[in-house]
Amino acid sequence: MSSTEHEVVSIYPFTNNQREELLTKARECVFNWSTRDGWPVGVVHAFVWRNGSGWITCGAHRHRVSAIRRDPRCSVVVSGVSAPDGPNGAITFKGRAIIHDDAETKKWFYPALARGPYGGFEGSLTAEEEEAASAFETRLDSPLRVIIEIVPEKWIMLDSDKMAKDTEGTLTDEERGPLLEADAVRMPAEMKRRGLS
């Protein structure tokens, strides 16, 4: 199943191109998992989007690694603030994590992280920037490090520009996503319960 075929639950969804642009330009994300006793926890991570998956890295001894070995279900939140020249809004995707500890994955991931948006680089690097990126890549390549791939299964998106157009009354039906159960059923019920018209 391609990333475009996953379930989308968004009244103000991004187009596929907008979603790819935001995720590709994002410098960081919040990675969320559940602890053994059921508490949801999230941390900010440097982030790479590649081949329809999110990629992060940490030490193999971190609690999040043992947690996703126990239960790979997790989520990732990416704010448009982390991609200043990208689309306005935010994306959450629910998915399952895969832990990679192989040389082939590290070979592409370390340079991608060091020379991509997180490193603050785009396009060709100056000699000084290349030196800084190479130093960062060397620091990343430690024996305890693993790389975590998050494969999306469900998208929750907010195109803030569409929301603003809806507030103004200029959003077309074609731009709007399907009405969610929260809006079609629960919101009217809650308004009725509160005596609102």
Image (cartoon, rainbow, N blue to C red):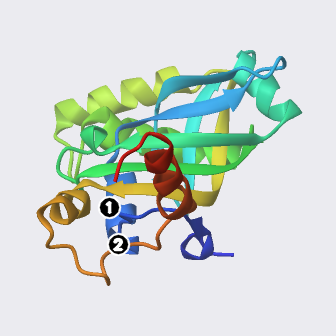
Give the CA separation, mark 1 to mark 2.
Answer: 6 Å
Answer above or below: position of 148 versus 61: below
Q: Are marks 1 and 2 in contact (CB under 8 Å)?
A: yes
Q: Is residue 50 left or right of residue 11?
A: right
Q: Is residue 5 left or right of residue 156?
A: right
For the residue pair 130 and 65, the one nearer the viewer reads as: 65
Residue type marked 2: Asn
Determine the residue positioned at 34% across, 36% down: 118
Answer above or below: position of 26 versus 159: above
Give the percent coordinates (x, y) of residue 181.
56, 62
Residue type marked 1: Glu
Determine the residue positioned at 51% across, 38% down: 110
Give the percent coordinates (x, y) of residue 156.
50, 55
The residue that label 2 is drawn on is: 17
Determine the residue positioned at 62% across, 57% down: 152
The residue that label 1 is drawn on is: 21
* Quadrant (top left/top right/bottom left/bottom right) for the N terminus: bottom right
Question: Given the current orientation, which residue lies at the most extreme bottom position?
Answer: 174
The answer to which quarter of the image holds residue 142 is top right
Q: Does residue 19 appear in this view?
A: yes
Q: Does residue 59 appear in this view?
A: no
Count of numbered circles in the view: 2
Label 2: which secondary element = helix
For the residue pair 114 and 96, the one nearer the viewer reads as: 96
* Quadrant (top left/top right/bottom left/bottom right) for the C terminus: bottom left
Give the percent coordinates (x, y) of residue 60.
74, 22
Q: Is residue 88 left or right of residue 75?
A: left
For the residue pair 167 and 127, the one nearer the viewer reads as: 167
Label 1: which secondary element = helix
Determine the residue positioned at 58% across, 45% down: 107
The answer to which quarter of the image holds residue 83 is top left
Question: Given the current orientation, which residue lies at the most extreme front position?
Answer: 195
